Image (tube, rainbow, N blue to C red):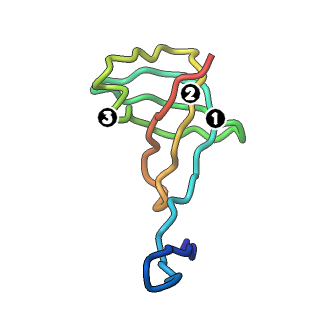
Amino acid sequence: MLTQTLAFCYYGPTPIVTTAPISNSVNGIVIEALPNTLFRVELEDGSIILAYLSGKMRLHKIRVLVGDKVSVTLDPYGGKGRIIKRTT
């Protein structure tokens, strides 16, 4: 998705086309923990996907257990999801 913003400089306003990230995050519940930080997550709409932990969650050693509510960013190509936040 492209958005247009105005950047003001000495010579006047110039339009700059930037790419804004599309947020495809949905909420779900972890139903199974698999090896290598993979999880089966049941989404709000009832579908079950395979999801992995994001790099920041691995870096800060945030633990995700079965039954935790998580926020998942979906892959635009229909592959795995990425767990970006553990909610309570």
* Amino acid type at mark 3: Gly
What is the secondary structure assignment of the residue under circle 1?
Answer: strand
Q: Please name the residue shown 46% across and 43% down the image.
A: 81
Residue drawn at point x = 58 percent, y = 15 percent: 67
* Label 2: element kind: strand
Q: Residues within 10 Å of mark 1 (few under 14, many from 20)?
A: some
Distance from Cα at disc 1 to Cα at disc 2? 6 Å
Q: Position of residue 3 (x, y in %)?
A: 57, 73
**Looking at the image, is mark 3 or mark 2 earlier in the sequence?**
3
**Residue 41 image offset from top left, x and y in percent:** 54, 31
Q: Nearer the viewer, residue 26 or 40?
A: 26
Label 3, secondary structure: give it: helix
- Farthest residue, direction front: 10
**Picture disc at residue 55:** 3
**Disc 1 marks which amino acid?**
Asn
Question: In the rendered image of this protein, does residue 79 appear above or below residue 10?
Answer: above
Among the 4 quarters of the image, the one containing residue 10: bottom left
Relative to 73, does residue 22 appear above or below in the rendering? below
Residue 69: image tag: none
Q: Amino acid at mark 2?
A: Val
Residue ID at (51%, 45%): 73
**Which of marks 1 and 3 precedes in the sequence?**
1
Residue 49 position within the rendered picture, expressed as x and y whole percent measured from the top left: 52, 40
Residue under numbered circle 2:
70
The image's mark for residue 27 is 1
